[in-house]
Amino acid sequence: MATPTMDKVEAEAAASSDLITVTFRIRRFNPEISEHAVWEDFELEIDPKERVLDGLHKIKWDLDGTLTFRRSCAHGICGSDAMRINGKNRLACKTLIKDINPEKPITVEAIKGLTVLKDLVVDMEPFFQAYRDVMPFLITKGNEPTRERRQSAEDRERFDDTTKCILCAACTTSCPVFWNDGQYFGPAAIVNAHRFIFDSRDEAGEQRLEILNDKDGVWRCRTTFNCTDACPRGIEVTKAIQEVKRALITRRY
């Protein structure tokens, strides 16, 4: 015998009973209209178990189609929807409404330290240029091997933490040094340099260390731990930066 299903009307009523009214306070910027950013409130009904990204979708699809933000996978992998939510850098797709005090307005704004292009979208090119500058790829010398480059589990574990970076820029744009001087490489670039400096298969560690020894490199870090707190992947960013500093001093890595 088939299991009886809930009547459609009852199902809709049950679903609506879970909804709460939430105010999204979004910092809007449109250079075609004004050179100044303004805060705009949107009120919507939403399930508190949904994510901030779901709320932004509701606003864009149902209330104001001009709202502009980035998102792709919506599952915390691509890193494209990093933004400041209630004053902290977070991924909108990983932040649940119920976890950020929905009884008060939820503030959403673009990440700091990068030029805002429109609403929640920033120019990521300076961030990616710093990433490219540290040569984030395996560099070896000699002839191409005839078999894979083997590595012990212990050697792999040495840099395992910094392989988790998804280039969301949450760490870099939470850094006060980066806010004040965009020339600083920033935590994300250093994390990705760390990933190869401590890779036993790589042979360009010395080059990367010299790049990070520059006046805009690791020595600009003030160890505020903002970057570690902001990382949605749980990377110990400050620890990685300290390890790069130690490698520069000892030349051991």
Image (cartoon, rainbow, N blue to C red):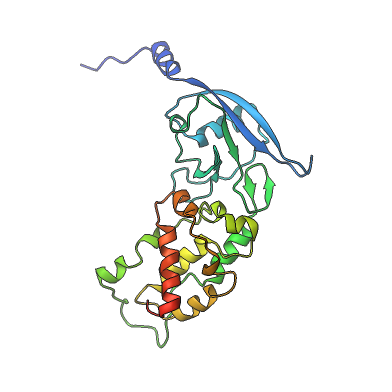
At a point 55% along the width and 69% down the height, the residue shown is 217
Q: Position of residue 83 (x, y in %)?
A: 56, 44
> Total of numbered circles in the picture?
0
Up-down relation of residue 163 to residue 83 (above or below): below
Q: Position of residue 100 (x, y in %)?
A: 47, 33
The quarter of the picture where the N terminus appears is top left
Residue 163 appears left or right of 167? left
At a point 61% along the width and 49% down the height, the residue shown is 112
Residue 109 appears left or right of 29? left
Residue 31 appears left or right of 237? right
Up-down relation of residue 24 to residue 121 (above or below): above
The quarter of the picture where the C terminus appears is bottom left
Quarter of the view holding residue 56: top right
Residue that protrudes farthest toward the bottom in the picture: 142
At a point 32% along the width and 68% down the height, the residue shown is 158
Q: Position of residue 238 (x, y in %)?
A: 44, 59
Q: Position of residue 136 (x, y in %)?
A: 48, 69
Residue that protrudes farthest toward the left in the picture: 1
At a point 51% along the width and 64% down the height, the residue shown is 189
The front one of 88 and 198 is 88
